[in-house]
Amino acid sequence: MRRILQVWLVAFGVVCVGIAVAHLLFGTSTIIGGGSVNATIDSDMRFYAILFLAYGLALLWCARDVETKGLPINLLGLIFFAGGLARALAWIVSGEPNWFYVLMTPVELVIPVLNCLLVRAVCRPAEIARV
């Protein structure tokens, strides 16, 4: 289970870093189903891309020593879950998004739960108590 969690965190972290770099360098043209936006929205998106980059790097950092990183992994999962809830809120407020984001919403709500289960299977008892 340890190796599965490590491989998963590395894969997830690399994907997050890749998405963040694409958003940072290429702006809103990387948004599936998106259209043209004004400079303010473009600026916000590139700003948040840096935060997503940090998120991906944090996942990679956690992968190095998963047995002692249960709490940070679960906190990152909680953040990702909140992102899924925010996406659902946008759907309610603004209407149905592109099909890709319709599919991503449940994924973003399930991944943190799976992460938490893996962490509980891998972390040291002292770490589990902190989680």
Image (spheres, grey):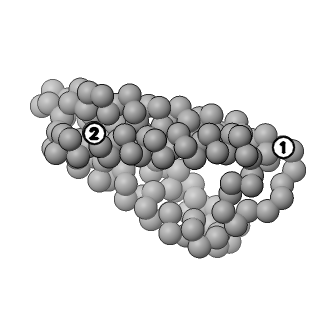
Q: Residue at x 59, y 73 (%)?
A: 99
User: Which residue is more in the foreground, 23 or 47?
Assistant: 23
Q: Residue at x 53, y 39 (%)?
A: 17
What's under tag 2, amino acid-wise?
Gln
User: Which residue is more in the foreground, 20 or 109?
Assistant: 20
The tag earlier along the polypeptide, 1 or 2, is 2
Helix, strand or loop status at disc 2: helix
**Residue 5 at x, y percent in the picture:** 26, 43
Pick out the residue farthest to the right.
38
Q: Residues within 10 Å of mark 1 (few under 14, many from 20)?
A: few
Which residue was labeled with disc 2?
6
Location of residue 111 with respect to 130 vertically, above or below: below
Location of residue 23 with respect to 29 vertically, above or below: above
**Residue 12 at x, y percent in the picture:** 41, 46
Which residue was labeled with disc 1?
40
Which of the image's four quarters has the C terminus?
top left
* 120 left or right, relative to 63: left
Res. 75 in view: no
**Residue 68 at x, y percent in the picture:** 23, 26
* 76 left or right, relative to 93: left
What's under tag 1, amino acid-wise?
Thr
